[in-house]
Amino acid sequence: MAGSLFAILLSSCANLNHSDPISSNGSNQNVISAKVMTDSESINSDSLQSFLEKVSKNHQIPLNDLKLAFEDTKAIPSIKKLVMPPPPGFQKNWNVYRSRFVEPRRLAAGQKFWVTHRSFIEKTEKETGVPAEIIVSIIGVETIYGRHMGGFSVRDTLSTLGFDYPNTPNKIARETLFKNQLEDLILLCWAENRQAKPFKTCLNQTGSYAGAIGLPQFMPGSIRRFAVDGNKDGKIDLRNSPEDAIASVANFLKVHGWVQDESIYLDIESGQSAQDNAARLADGEPKAKLQLGELINQGLLKQSSLPANTPSLIVDLPSPGNNGGTDVRYVIGLRNFLAICDYNRSFFYAQSVAEFAEALNDVRPTGDVAKKATKKPKNNKKAAKKK
């Protein structure tokens, strides 16, 4: 199933963060497959042996325990197909990508999740400054609130990608990256339980085709560095504890620079001059190389209550157009857009999270909590009143 569907979902940029290194901690997992691929082959035993010896020496974990836990490790060929880049000439499609996440079924599930965990979500929002609808949006985009957390052995997934990554230009760098994640998985599971059976069970827990785990699809390294024990039960369980998942998503964004009460993005002016300037300034990199004042001076935005030196970037969201061309929507990304890109380095992903959050905010639980606006696209003077 990797082929065309995976290619459709690829977006402007890709890198490993806490989750799926190709396009998300697992969002593609939701729409590609939730079942285990049963094809398998042997891992290079010499490479794995050398790796386990290094981990044993560096972290004082008995080598025999590691060998026992990895004795039946298998490569999963189908995973290698899923991480392959799209074919030459493939056109990214923002409209299709968005439609898979900002849609009625996910919205209804988000409403239910928010109502069920409202008290804890709003407590987390108050403590971290990360809006409730963003927390709910990310968990919804990643796994539809736990419905699709992946069915691949995380141990075998990371071993496959760490020791037998497809022959791509970045093969060596990617193998190193996944070996590091495999090491993090070992340390995570060893800290949890050093008995042979539970240690091996932890290693073999299921996740996405890139090794992402739980409701928010965190990679092992991000679980170790950014996950939080939200329900205060003495352990972090992103698979079974919504509170841990909620708190961990908020903590990740906070650590990665979330700015309270600043917008995620701003719509640019619709005139041709503004569109041409946006096209010229868009470079596809998730870096704030511009300042908002510059963009106002160049006519992309009439005005804003945000400071002129607010870091900004131009986000391009292309879709196939009529007559074989390309239609591109441009928006101005702000610091919170980049915080979401740190969760998943994809413009499509970050914009989908923002727009799904807007949809969720329109149906947020009512009561004693005042309804807020996620974004006010029709009035840029007020846009800063949200994320």
Image: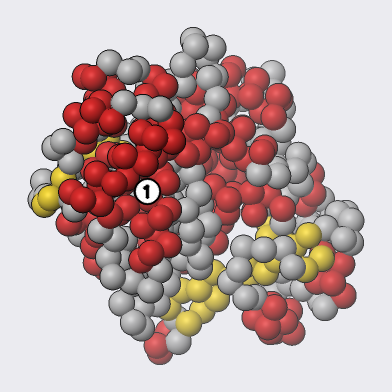
Left or right of 163 in this view: 260: right
Q: Position of residue 244 (x, y in %)?
A: 50, 23
41 relative to 69, above or below: below
Residue visible at 76% across and 39% down in the picture: 260
Residue placed under numbered mark 1 in the picture: 179
Residue visible at 50% across and 32% down in the picture: 224
Left or right of 67 in this view: 194: right
Q: Say whether residue 7 is visible.
A: no
Q: Nearer the viewer, residue 159 or 93?
A: 159
Q: Nearer the viewer, residue 360 or 68?
A: 68
Q: Nearer the viewer, residue 356 or 210?
A: 210
Q: Residues within 10 Å of mark 1 (few under 14, many from 20)?
A: many
Instruction: Give the farthest residue toward the bottom.
Output: 323
Can you tell which quarter of the image residue 212 is in?
top left
What is the number of callouts on the image? 1
Q: Secondary structure at mark 1?
A: helix
Q: Quadrant of the N terminus?
A: bottom left
4 relative to 237, above or below: below
Q: Position of residue 141 (x, y in %)?
A: 44, 44
Residue visible at 66% across and 28% down in the picture: 125
Q: Position of residue 142 (x, y in %)?
A: 42, 43
Mark 1 is on which residue type? Lys
Q: Quadrant of the C terminus?
A: top right
